[in-house]
Image: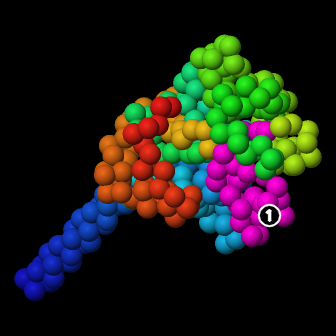
Amino acid sequence: MKKKKYTKLAAVGLALVAILAGCSSGNAADSDTDVRTIKVAYDQSTKPMSWTDDKGNATGYDVEVMKLVDELLPDYEFEFVGTTSDDLLVGVEQGKYQVGIKNAFWTEERTEKFIFPTEFIGLSSAGLVLAKENAGIQTLADFASAGFSLAPIAANNAQYTIIDEYNTANPDNKVQLKAGDAFSVDVVQWVNEGRVDGGVMIEGPFEKQVTAEDGPYHNLVDDVVYNEFAVIKTWPLFNKKEQDFADAYDKVIIQIKEDKKTNELSTEFYGRDLFEVLEAVER
């Protein structure tokens, strides 16, 4: 009888161990749910800042920096969602995405719709695309003085704000600025066709479209030029309810910059370390 009693007690003990083990396993699973999935929208047509490669993977300067941010934030797991510029802006504003990356410049209007973190994500070269015979035009002041026509820019495009800010600061030498219906136009083609004297463009896309041997406008490499007039800080755009997430981003991006990872990625994707001119950046 005693033997059976001991056997029953042993069975009960094993059952308790199994139950406790199951509870422990359940708690571990529950702890995994503390990791929050973040949808990071990226403009998949702005190579080399962000795009979807041939294998369907998100990449580009902005994307790769955010991947480093993800590695340093164990409480978050990033899911990169490729989309259009318009959908990114609307989606982040409405909360469909928690953050968006699109080589975005700061504007006063955007601060009403998005959280701008304290720390910028990168730097971007903005320049004028001109016919080669006008290569002597180096600045916006030169362009305005020449009385040249500029390709239209949508009023909600941050490039419009850049020219508008210049015009406000230089009322006696304004660039002819016209708001366009489309967010952006095919600047290289407009200049090549003589529809305008010049247009504002970001260096990365110009390099990919014109300078690169496989670029769609590489045949115009000897006909058009890109003259940089400013290097500008770029920012991730956070949904208005994501202040805690934006604060977490700020803490780790500082370390990424101190480790020179942003310098390395700038060289990799832009062909130059734009951080070398950071002290001269005014915007």
Q: Answer above or below: position of 1 versus 53.
A: below
Image-based side of 44 in relation to 120, left or right = right
> Nearest the camera: 95 or 268?
268
Indicate whether residue 220 is drawn in magenta.
Answer: yes
**Residue 264: in sight, yes or no?**
yes
Residue indicated by mark 1: 218
Q: Position of residue 94 (x, y in %)?
A: 63, 32
Indicate whether residue 225 is drawn in magenta.
Answer: yes
Under mark 1, the amino acid is His
Farthest left residue in view: 2
Q: Answer above or below: position of 17 versus 242.
A: below
Secondary structure beneath label 1: helix
Tell me, what colour scheme is on the image?
rainbow
Residue 261: which quarter of the image?
bottom left
Magenta part of the chain: 198-227
In the picture, the quarter occupied by the N terminus is: bottom left
Image-based side of 170 in relation to 119, left or right = right
Look at 22% across and 68% down and name the residue there. Answer: 16
Q: Residues within 10 Å of mark 1 (few under 14, many from 20)?
A: some
Q: Position of residue 46 (x, y in %)?
A: 68, 52
**Residue 19: in sight, yes or no?**
no
Q: Answer above or below: position of 91 versus 71.
A: above
Look at 21% across and 76% down and name the residue there. Answer: 14
